[in-house]
């Protein structure tokens, strides 16, 4: 078991609203949403390294207004929900063929 910190300078209630593991048998990745910084992060579970970020504050596709929840399906597609006045679901389709 390990502990990791992300976006240490974030104020308010912290930087992680929710997280899920990738659907591969090894669960190599962690997908987390950050409602304060309004982004989705892809983390390598073995090293806790941030591999990628999706989103920024806003109301257009791929942007977030208080992103709060996250889910992943068997194909690796990621779904996010927003609260406050965002009130929507976004789907991010997996395009690569690797886990």
Image (cartoon, rainbow, N blue to C red):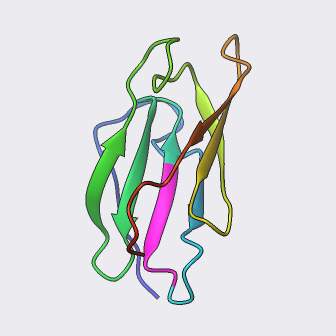
Task: Write down the region rendered in magenta.
Answer: 27-32
The vertical placement of 8 against 87, above or below, is below
Residue at the image point whose x is 54% and y is 70% from the top: 22
In the picture, measured across the screen, residue 79 lies left or right of residue 94, that is right
Residue 7 as seen in the image, left or right of residue 15: left
- Could you say which quadrant of the image residue 76 lies in? bottom right
Residue 78 placed where, x, y %?
Answer: 58, 51
Q: Residue at x 50, y 89 (%)?
A: 26
Q: Is residue 14 left or right of residue 20?
A: left
Could you say where residue 88 lies in the image, as x and y percent from the top left? 71, 23
Q: Report the front residue among 75 and 11.
A: 75
How many numbered badges does the structure rendering display? 0
Q: Is residue 96 above or below residue 78?
A: below
* Residue 20 position by quadrant: bottom right
Q: Residue at x 51, y 23 (%)?
A: 64
* Rendered residue at 53%/32% (across/down): 35
- Which quadrant of the rendered structure holds the C terminus? bottom left
User: In the image, 87: left or right of 32?
Assistant: right
> Where residue 48 sits: x, y (%)?
31, 71
With respect to residue 67, does 63 lie above or below? above
| Magenta stretch, overall SS | strand
> Is residue 15 covered in magenta?
no
Choose between 26 and 65: the one closer to the eye.
Answer: 26
């Amino acid at each position: 078991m390990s502990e990791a910190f992300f976006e240490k300078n974030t104020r308010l209630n912290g930087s992680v609203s929710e997280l899920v593991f990738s659907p591969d048998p090894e669960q190599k990745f962690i997908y987390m949403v950050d409602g304060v910084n309004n982004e989705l992060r892809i983390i390598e579970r073995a090293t806790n390294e941030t591999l990628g970020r999706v989103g920024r504050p806003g109301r257009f596709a791929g942007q977030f207004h208080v992103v709060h929840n996250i889910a992943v399906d068997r194909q690796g597609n990621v779904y996010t929900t927003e609260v406050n006045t965002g009130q929507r679901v976004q789907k991010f389709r997996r395009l690569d063929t690797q886990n």
